[in-house]
Image (spheres, rainbow, N blue to C red):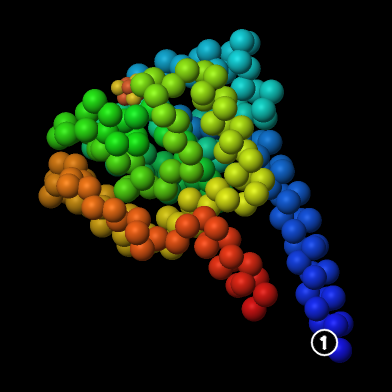
């Protein structure tokens, strides 16, 4: 009896893995992008999209509205004013959704690290699934990052949108701090992610929930 139960559980896991794997394959090969050309990194998008690097061969294309987009590109520094619009757009996107930050500015503020109108840690305001280092990143680096993001989607590791849902209050508190001008930037930077689950922990949790 016990063996039967183990066999049935394994069978169910295999089927689930097969369908999840298939869904992830289609997700990674049909990413529609919404891009906020907020900084200098935007200038690298046209060569990445056009014939030389041709990102369409990866199944990626531009999308005009957030409600039909899967991928939000933040292409450089982000002013506080723009952050508000970016959050509105992100929250309108359907799940699963992914965020890619271009260049140093979304990672740590870059050359604007202490500028009052510019945020210095995008990850403190919305979950970032992939960051591309550089000032500014070249098309090769952008294509490389998209391919890595696709791998993470296939493996079910790109779960920033779940982190956003789970820690909504934490993100909202950070957003309110700068949008209501209580703080220009979130400094000094205390590691706010210490209490957050990693992608692996979220995946393990999800698999436990699906067995309940
Ligand atoms: S990382 Fe460099 S290239 Fe990108 S937005 Fe910042 S200053 Fe501009």
Assess mark 1: CB under 8 A from ligand 1? no
Q: Residue furthest top?
A: 52
Q: Give the quadrant of the C terminus.
A: bottom right
User: Looking at the picture, does residue 118 appear above or below residue 191?
Assistant: above
Q: Is residue 179 visible?
A: yes
Q: What number of labels is visible?
A: 1
Q: Give the quadrant of the N terminus.
A: bottom right
Label 1's element? Answer: helix
* Residue beneath the point at 52% across and 38% down: 71
- Picture quadrant of residue 101: top left
**Residue nearest the viewer, comparing 16 with 37:** 16
Viewed as shown, does residue 194 lie left or right of 57? left
Viewed as shown, does residue 162 lie left or right of 116? right
Viewed as shown, does residue 21 lie left or right of 65? right
* Residue beneath the point at 78% across and 56% down: 18
Which percent across, then down, holds residue 67? 52, 42
Viewed as shown, does residue 152 lie left or right of 80? right
Which percent across, then down, holds residue 168? 37, 60
Q: Is residue 81 visible?
A: no
Q: Residues within 10 Å of mark 1 (few under 14, many from 20)?
A: few
Q: Quadrant of ligand 1?
A: top left
Mark 1 — residue? 2
* Residue beneath the point at 26% across and 57% down: 173
């Amino acid at each position: 009896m016990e063996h039967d139960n183990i066999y049935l559980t394994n069978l169910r896991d295999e089927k689930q893995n097969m369908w999840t794997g298939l869904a992830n394959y289609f997700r990674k090969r049909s990413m529609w992008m919404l891009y906020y050309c907020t900084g200098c990194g935007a200038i690298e998008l046209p060569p990445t999209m056009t014939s030389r690097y041709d990102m369409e061969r990866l199944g990626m294309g531009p999308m005009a509205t957030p409600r039909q987009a899967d991928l939000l590109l933040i292409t450089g520094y982000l002013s506080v004013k723009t952050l508000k619009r970016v959050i509105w757009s992100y929250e309108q996107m359907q799940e699963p959704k992914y965020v890619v930050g271009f260049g140093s500015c979304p990672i740590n503020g870059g050359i604007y690290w202490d500028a009052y109108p510019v945020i210095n840690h995008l990850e403190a305001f919305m979950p970032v699934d992939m960051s591309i280092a550089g000032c500014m990143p070249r098309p090769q680096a952008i294509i490389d990052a998209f391919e890595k993001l696709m791998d993470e989607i296939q493996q079910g590791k790109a779960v920033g949108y779940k982190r956003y849902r789970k820690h909504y209050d934490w993100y909202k508190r950070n957003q309110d701090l700068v949008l209501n001008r209580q703080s220009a930037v979130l400094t000094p930077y205390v590691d706010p992610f210490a209490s957050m689950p990693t992608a692996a922990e979220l995946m393990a949790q999800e698999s436990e929930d699906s067995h309940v």
